[in-house]
Image (cartoon, coloured by chain):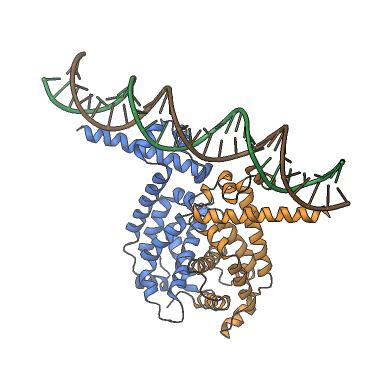
Chain colours: A blue, B orange, C green, D brown
DNA sequence: CTTTTAATGACCATTATGTTGATTAGCAAT
DNA sequence: ATTGCTAATCAACATAATGGTCATTAAAAG
């Protein structure tokens, strides 16, 4: 089968391109990346890039979408009531641990995209994802009608993402299990000392 | 006095340049702004731009710094214990109202910088500011030592900024007074329905 | 009328883009 | 092995855009 081999070649090249894009984001920032730049660093021909992607925006979009699809996978078993129960038992909620594991696997890319040299659109993209994936049922369960759901979900998703960013920025020193506990603790703690 | 008139000219031109930058951020996004582009829209000579700023990054930095300096001004009277007391009386905490007033005055620029076409570095800049300006004494007052201060402040500042962004994205329909109440309510509410 | 300073217009070197025709590499069938 | 097929790669081209500078002009003030 010729296809198989060729698919492998294609996959190899695409990985190389994506890896180089991440390197350049970390180095000079996404906005400064050019196709020339990228292909030089990856030591491939510029034409090769255009064989796989339309432009650098097409590339980053595919990278982001793959990342978020994996995230969706890892989030789909989260149930809010179980999370609350785990918190009360001071135990890490397993589906949440899975999410942090996945985030850790893709930590470099996440940090790059969310950081000061990243894609300014990605943060919102990700918060939308979190809202649907983690907070949907939680927000629905809100009983206090004097609290706007829109503001509350903005609050919750941003807060969650803030913790993730802080984790990434400190080299992901805590284990996914620890992070699940830390998150639950802060989340249910409230802000009144 | 020659200086006065010339200062007025300079001020006029700088305002024009800054206003045009904001227009272009809203339109094509900061990363796509070029000096050529900008000066064309502002109908001034390209050389004139370089007479006032080094490049577009110098320009945006000055715009951001002015914004944040004003914010610092408006935040400097915030005292956490008073805020808590206001919350318990269900009253808007005045210094917080002042902050929201200031944010509203600069709403367009803020929304542009924080949005998907903005400056990916600005969000962090702003959160650092909020941390020092609003949350410093609050975080210090945290007694629960099992909660990491770093994660907690990441949580708090991101959450606060999240609410602000949501407000901006919905056209700042609520008054600064309302926002001060909404914020306090969510903040002290905790996340356990 | 002279001085000062902002604004202008034009210039040049550099860099990015996207495409196309030629070339190479890998695999299969004989 | 060798021939043929397919897909990936490469080198080169034409076009367009960008950035920064400098000599020149215009405007304001005394």
How far from the left and from the top, in percent, is residue C21?
33, 23
The quarter of the rendered structure image containing the N terminus of chain B is bottom right
Residue for point 42% across, 60% down: A177
How far from the left and from the top, in percent, is residue B130?
60, 65
Residue for point 50% across, 57% down: A165
Residue for point 41% across, 62% down: A128
User: Which sits in the foreground, A28 or A160?
Assistant: A28
The quarter of the rendered structure image containing the C terminus of chain B is bottom left
Q: Is residue A77 visible?
A: yes
- Which quadrant holds residue A144? bottom left
Image vertical order of residue C29 relative to residue B149, above or below: above
Relative placement, left or right, of B66 versus C19 is right
Residue for point 63% across, 73% down: B98
User: Which sits in the foreground, B77 or B146?
Assistant: B77
Image vertical order of residue B151 relative to residue B24, above or below: below
Q: Is residue A185 visible?
A: no
How far from the left and from the top, in percent, is residue B68?
64, 61
């Amino acid at each position: 089968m010729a296809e198989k081999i060729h698919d492998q070649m294609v996959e190899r090249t695409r990985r190389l391109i994506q890896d180089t894009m991440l390197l350049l984001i970390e180095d000079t920032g996404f906005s400064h990346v050019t196709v020339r730049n990228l292909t030089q660093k990856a030591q491939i021909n510029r034409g090769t890039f255009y064989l796989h992607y339309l432009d650098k925006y097409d590339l980053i979009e595919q990278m982001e979408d793959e990342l978020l699809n994996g995230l969706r996978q890892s989030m789909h078993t989260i149930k809010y009531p179980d999370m609350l129960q785990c918190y009360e038992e001071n135990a890490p909620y397993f589906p949440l641990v899975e999410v942090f594991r996945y985030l850790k696997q893709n930590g470099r890319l996440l940090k790059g995209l969310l950081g000061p040299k990243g894609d300014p659109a990605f943060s919102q993209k990700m918060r939308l994802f979190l809202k649907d994936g983690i907070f949907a049922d939680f927000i629905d369960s809100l009983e206090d009608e004097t609290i706007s759901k829109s503001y509350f979900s903005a609050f919750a998703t941003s807060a969650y993402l803030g913790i993730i960013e802080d984790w990434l920025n400190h080299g992901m020193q805590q284990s996914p299990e620890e992070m699940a506990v830390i998150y639950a603790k802060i989340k249910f703690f409230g802000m009144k000392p």
